[in-house]
Amino acid sequence: MKKQPKPKVAFFDFTDCEGCQLQLANMGNTFLELTELIDIVNFREIMSEKGEDYDIAVVEGSISTDNDVKRIKEIRAKAKILVAFGSCAAIAGVNGIKNRTSLEVAKERVYADKAHTINTIKVMPLDRVVKVDYYILNCPPYIPEIIAVFKSILMGKPYPLPNYPVCVECKMNENVCRYEKDQECMGPLTRAGCNSWCINNGNRCYACRGLLENPAADGAKEILEKYGLKVEDILNHFTLYNDPQGEKYDQEFAR
C-alpha cells in the first residue's frame, strides 16, 4: 500500500507578538511527534527556508493594514486549509484595543509626529477578510487544544468549538469562584475549551477566547449585582481581547 505524503504546513504571522508560535516550542516532544505527521515548509521562528507550496496555513495575528488584507488573501488562495491560530487571529485580540478610538487618535498616540506616515486600518480577525476552516483560540493557545485541532485536521474532521462558558470547566475543576475572592472574571460569558487554565493557576478569566454565541447576559448581570459591580466596570476591565467583539459585549449587556 502506497504511503500517503505528509501534508505541507506553513506558519505565518501578521500583527502579533509571535507568542502563539512560540507556544509550539512549549509542546516539547509532542511537537516533535507532530512533525512526524506533517511537513513544515515555512516557519520563521525555527527555519530559514520559506516554502511557497503548502496545504495548510496556520496564521497568527490580526489584520491591521491594507498590505495585510492583500497578503492574507494570497495565503488563503494557496492553502487548502487555513487555521486561525490564537486570539489575535481569531477575534482580533489585544490589537483590537485600537478600535476603541479613531484611527487618527490611535496613530497620534503611538507614532506622534510620524503618524501621517503610517498606513493602518481598523483591526480585524482573519475571518473578516477570508474563510477560516479551523480556530485555535486562547492567548497563548492551550496546548491540548492545539493537539486536538491538528488531530481533527489530519483526520479530515471538523473541530467544533465549545459553546458553553468557562464557568462550566471551572466548576468541574473545583475552583473557588473568582468573585468570591473579590476578583472580576469573564468566565460566565467566555467560550470554554481552555479547561479554565487561568483560574486553575490562580488568575482570572480575561475572555481571551471570545464571547459565547448566546451568552447568558442576564445571569452575568445577576452575578455583578450580587457582588456590587457595575456593567461599565466589567466592560472597562475586559476590553483587552475583545474588539471588534466589544460591540457584541455592549449589546448583550445593554438588553
Image (cartoon, rainbow, N blue to C red):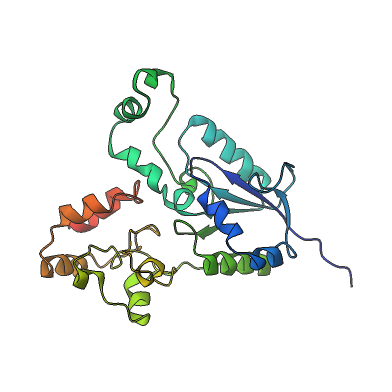
Residue 128 shown left or right of residue 213 in the figure: right
Residue 22 percent location from the top left of the image: 56, 53
Q: Answer yes or no: is residue 254 visible.
A: no
Residue 18 shown left or right of residue 189 in the figure: right
Number of numbered tags placed on the structure image: 0
What's the residue at 43%, 23% (across, down)? 118
Quadrant of the drawing holding the C terminus: bottom left
* Picture quadrant of residue 150: bottom right
Residue 192 percent location from the top left of the image: 40, 68
* Picture quadrant of residue 218: bottom left
Quadrant of the drawing holding the N terminus: bottom right
Residue 227 percent location from the top left of the image: 13, 68
Q: Is residue 168 above or below residue 110?
A: below
What's the residue at 67%, 66% (across, down)? 154
* Picture quadrant of residue 74: top right
Query: Residue extending furthest right?
Result: 1
Q: Answer yes or no: is residue 177 visible.
A: yes
Q: Nearer the viewer, residue 86 or 180?
A: 180
Residue 73 shown left or right of residue 164 in the figure: right
Residue 1 shown left or right of residue 199 in the figure: right
Q: Nearer the viewer, residue 124 or 94?
A: 94
